[in-house]
Image (tube, rainbow, N blue to C red):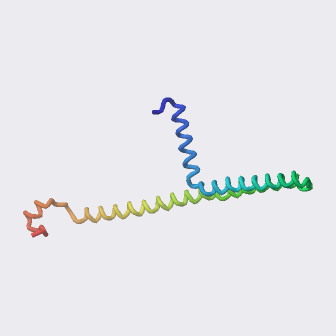
C-alpha cells in the first residue's frame, strides 16, 4: 500500500486538490476553454498577419490577448471566492438544521421520560393494561 510518509503526503495533497476542484469544476472548465479559445483566435490572427503582411496591429493583438486571459482569470477568482462564503453558509444552515433535529429528539425523549417508568410487555400483561388483548 503506502510505502512511506512521502506517499501519504502526496495522497493528502491530491485529496485536498480534489476537494478544492470539486465545487469549482464547471468554472474551471470554462476558464480553460476560454484561455484555449483566446489563444487559438490569436494564433489565427497571427497566421493572417503572416499571409497579409499587415503588421499594423500585431503588438496590440498581444496586449488584447493577455488582457483577455487576465480578465478571464480575474472573473474565475471572483466567482469562486464567493463559493467559500456559500459553503460556510451551507455549513451553518446544515448545523442549524441538525441542532433543531436534536432538539426535537430531546423533546421526544423528555416526553417519554415524563410518562413514567417504561414497562415490558410481560409487566403490562400482568397488570392487565396490555392493548393486544
Nearest the viewer among 105 and 52 is 52
Give x and y (percent) for residue 107: 33, 64
Q: Is residue 25 above or below residue 97?
A: above
Task: Identify which residue is drawn at 63% across, 55% down.
Answer: 29
Q: Nearest the camera: 29 or 92?
A: 29
Image quadrant where one finds the C terminus? bottom left
Total tally of numbered discs in the picture: 0
Nearer to us in this view, 116 or 35: 35
Residue pictured at 46% horizontal, 61% vertical: 96
Residue 119 visible in the snapshot: yes
Q: Is residue 32 left or right of residue 90?
A: right
Q: Is residue 66 visible?
A: no
Q: Quadrant of residue 82?
A: bottom right
- Residue found 79% across the figure and 52% down from its top: 43
Measured as percent of width and height from the top left, residue 65 is found at 80, 54
Q: Is residue 102 left or right of residue 116?
A: right
Quarter of the image where the N terminus is located: top left
Amino acid at each position: 500500500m503506502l510505502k512511506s510518509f512521502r506517499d501519504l503526503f502526496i495522497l493528502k495533497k491530491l485529496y485536498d486538490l480534489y476537494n478544492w476542484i470539486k465545487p469549482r469544476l464547471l468554472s474551471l472548465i470554462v476558464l480553460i476553454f476560454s484561455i484555449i479559445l483566446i489563444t487559438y483566435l490569436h494564433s489565427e490572427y497571427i497566421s493572417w498577419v503572416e499571409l497579409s503582411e499587415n503588421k499594423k496591429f500585431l503588438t496590440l493583438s498581444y496586449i488584447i490577448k493577455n488582457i483577455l486571459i487576465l480578465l478571464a482569470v480575474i472573473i474565475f477568482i471572483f466567482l469562486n471566492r464567493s463559493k467559500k462564503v456559500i459553503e460556510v453558509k451551507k455549513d451553518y444552515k446544515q448545523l442549524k438544521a441538525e441542532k433543531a433535529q436534536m432538539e426535537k429528539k430531546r423533546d421526544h425523549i423528555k416526553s417519554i421520560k415524563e410518562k413514567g417508568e417504561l414497562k415490558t410487555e410481560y409487566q403490562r400483561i400482568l397488570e392487565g393494561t396490555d392493548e393486544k388483548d
